Image (cartoon, grey):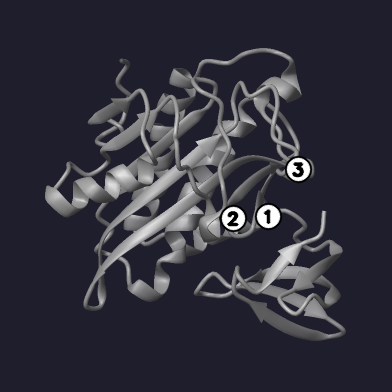
Amino acid sequence: MNVPETLFTGKNAIFLPEVDSTNAHALDLLSKTNPQEGTCIFSDYQTAGRGQIGRYWHSSQGKNLLISYIFYPKFIKVTDQFLLNIVASLAVYDVICQYTTDVKIKWPNDIYVGDKKIAGILVQTLLRSNEIRACVIGIGINVNENSFPEILPNPTSLFQLKGANFECESIRLQLSSRLEYYYLKMKGLHYNYLKELYLNAMYRFGIPADYKLLDDRIIHGTITGIDDSGKLLISRNGTIMTFDFREISFLI
């Protein structure tokens, strides 16, 4: 197993040939021990991988990068925890940009190539009173997947895009490096810098498009940014509307 050229992120790496979920395993570790910051758990296969809002995450055995990192971001306020999504999204975005073009971050934390999803992120925080005790950043990147279930609406992989296989190990090392870079930027309180990068890479930013609301209404509007808590801002008929990620979906 190769070791990333980082200060701490990914240095302590735990490989599991098969696991229910790398995030679940990381959370279990946190409930029993105090793992070194930057500890990562990665696996060839998840039996119960999940994305945002409990959505199913498909991955064939040994074909993709399935990894979770443990951090202790006690230095950020609970109200600022969307920064963790920004940090993770930017790290994955940077890595995918090394292999292909037209890469975007789809709010809140999916990575798209064109109009297809190539990676997903699940950030789970453990709170104590008014502070973040720990967080787990779970990342799934479709690397060498050559087919997807029809139930998935718009997936893709590096293999499908490029017609070649890639080394998941190399991508893991790159990811650990970029994740640490942005994590330390967050620790250094460079919030505006991180948000600016996120907006610059944002899928459909400034582009009029249709969106579906919880009540099945379709609205037409333009993404103008995110607020301090990470909610999506959409301009519609001269009015700025605010949405949590459970309240709106993209029509693609």
Q: Secondary structure at mark 1?
A: loop
Q: Quadrant of the N terminus?
A: top left
Q: CA distance from mark 2 to mark 1?
A: 6 Å
Quadrant assignment, res 187 = bottom left
Residue drawn at 39 percent across, 48 percent down = 137
CB within 8 Å, label 2 to label 1: yes
Q: Is residue 214 above or below residue 20?
A: below
Between tags 2 and 3, which lies in front? 3
Q: Quadrant of residue 69?
A: top left
Relative to 16, 99 lies left or right:
right
Point out the tag, 2 or 3, that comes first from the N-terminus.
3
The residue where tag 2 is placed is: 198
Identity, as a three-letter code, of the amino acid under mark 1: Met
207, 250: nearer the viewer: 250
Graded by Cα atoms within 10 Å as few (under 14), some (14 to 19) or many (20 or more), the crowding at tag 3 reads few
Residue 154, numbered label: 3
* Structural crowding at the residue carrying mark 1, measured as other residues with C-alpha within 10 Å and reported as few (<14), some (14–19) or many (≥20): many
Camera-side residue of 62 and 204: 62
Amino acid type at mark 2: Tyr
- Which type of secondary structure does the marked residue at label 2 adopt? helix
Residue at 34%, 51% (x, y): give it. 136
Residue at the top extreme? 164
Question: x and y percent of residue 79 in the render?
Answer: 40, 75
The picture places residue 39, in percent across and down from the top left corner, at: 26, 38
Is 3 above or below relative to 211? Answer: above
The foreground one among 140 and 171 is 140
Residue 134, quarter of the rendered image = bottom left
Label for residue 202?
1
Amino acid type at circle 3 is Asn
Give coordinates of residue 75: x percent, y percent: 26, 64
- Residue found 22% across the figure and 31% down from its top: 12
